[in-house]
Amino acid sequence: MALPLRAAAPLPVLRRLRLRTGHAAAATVLLVCVPTGEKDVAAAVHVTPADLASMLLVTLVGADLLRGRTAGPGRRVCLLLAGIVLAAAAATLHSVDPAASITGFVRLVQVFVLVPAAVACAVRDRRDLHLVLGSLVAVALVEGAVGAHQYLTGTGASYTGRPIRAVGTFGALDIMAMSSVVSFGLLAALALALAERGPHGRPALRRGLYAAAAFLTFPLAVSFSRGSWIACGCAAAVLLLRADARLAVRGAVLAAAAAVVLVGGLGLGASGVTDRLGSIGAVQAAPDQSVTDRYDLWSTATRIWQDHPLTGAGPKVFQQLRDGHAPLRLSSGSDAEDSSIGFQREPLLSPHNMYFLVLSEQGLLGIVAYAGLFLALLGGCLRRAAGAGLAALGLLVWVLVDFLYADIGGTTTVLTSVLLGLAARTAFPGPDDGETR
């Protein structure tokens, strides 16, 4: 008599290799390094390998939610993210160019809603958190090594007429991408190192992470990105003060001593770094052209908002209305040059300030929704961040400070989504969440 056939049980090895959503989150971070070869910054849509990985992450998390394998991001997070969706939808419906705003609406939902919610669900325990933070450190070390080589060999982007600006694999058209990635890795390494203190910590790993953070300060310096310097300094200070105030003071003293030795003594990065640092204090009294252009773009955004106060002009409409509201002295674009693209003029398509961008394109409804989200995340992280979770606090502070003089756009935009997801996971842990400290 023939026995009834039964489906074979999955092999144990296949069960062990089953893709965790945390792996998809880490892949999203790692794929940021892949060069895209994009040379048209004015194109309506830019899809990168990291964007595709983020959509895979959203799909995997969605499937797990439907099957009951994972919990949702929590009621408070859902309400905050729903506010973002409603504000973007209202701005799109009342846009001066609804067709152009549809792509902007999709991008906003991806960056500020879907991917952060997916990351908050995907990071279930300490293993997932360390996986994502480790990916940030790995990407930063790769890009930092490339950037340091570019500075030392004179093969980077043009800065003051010389090819010394570190840009990593991103190129001169995405000039702040490498400095952002390096900053994320530095803060993640610092938080992971702090988590290894105490009797149960691993001294060798702690020393390695401190060394990684120390190395990343060099490519960050020779990126010549004042915005990233300020954001990283603020984020590191908040992270250290939250962990140990005395350690923060010692860290500041050591950082100052290292800067004196490396820049003043050995001359590493001295060409341009000291002048660039000095220019930070001159942004009011004697601003350079890039700072003047930012001020003009901010005033342009304000004028656009005054014409559309409640719902804004619509996502991705700023660039259409810019010339009709901008002062005559605003530059037509910024210079970009390296060995792969030659010399180009990069158009100024946004106000280079996320808060002014939201105000001009999504109006009062938008700025209230984003302020509610950011303040809720910051307050929750300040109360609950501990151990490796301190990274979420530091990375969130970096984003909020950087948004004062930058906005979303470019290859690393999806990383902002990942950081917001980590912040949501830390700020609003669910009752059944695994340990992430």
Image: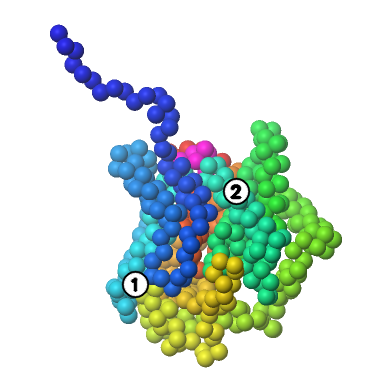
Q: Which residues are magenta?
A: 124-129
Residue type at mark 2: give it. Answer: Val
Q: Circle 2 sits on which residue? A: 137
Which residue is situated farthest in the left direction here?
Answer: 1
Question: Can see residue 427?
Answer: no
The residue located at (45%, 61%) in the rendering is: 373
N-terminal label among 1 and 2: 1
Which residue is rendered at x = 40% and y = 48% of the image? 57
Determine whether the residue tagged by mark 2 lies in a helix, strand or loop: helix
Whether residue 276 sits left or right of residue 397 in the image: it is: right
Magenta: predominant secondary structure element? helix
- The Cα atoms of the two marked residues, 1 and 2, are separated by 35 Å
Task: Kindly state the secondary structure of the residue where label 1 is placed.
Answer: helix
Q: Is residue 296 left or right of residue 255?
A: left
- Say whether residue 427 is left or right of residue 231: left
Mark 2, residues whose alpha carbon is within 10 Å: few (<14), some, or many (≥20)? many
Residue 128 painted magenta:
yes
Q: In this rendering, is residue 404 above or below 197?
A: below
| Residue assigned mark 1 | 101
**Which quadrant of the figure has residue 267?**
bottom right
Q: Is residue 253 above or below residue 226?
A: above
Q: Position of residue 214 (x, y in %)?
A: 71, 51
Q: Which class describes the residues within 10 Å of circle 1: few (<14), some (14-19), or many (20+)?
A: many
x and y percent of residue 290 in the render? Answer: 60, 78
Residue type, numbered disc 1: Ser
Q: Nearer the viewer, residue 160 or 104?
A: 160
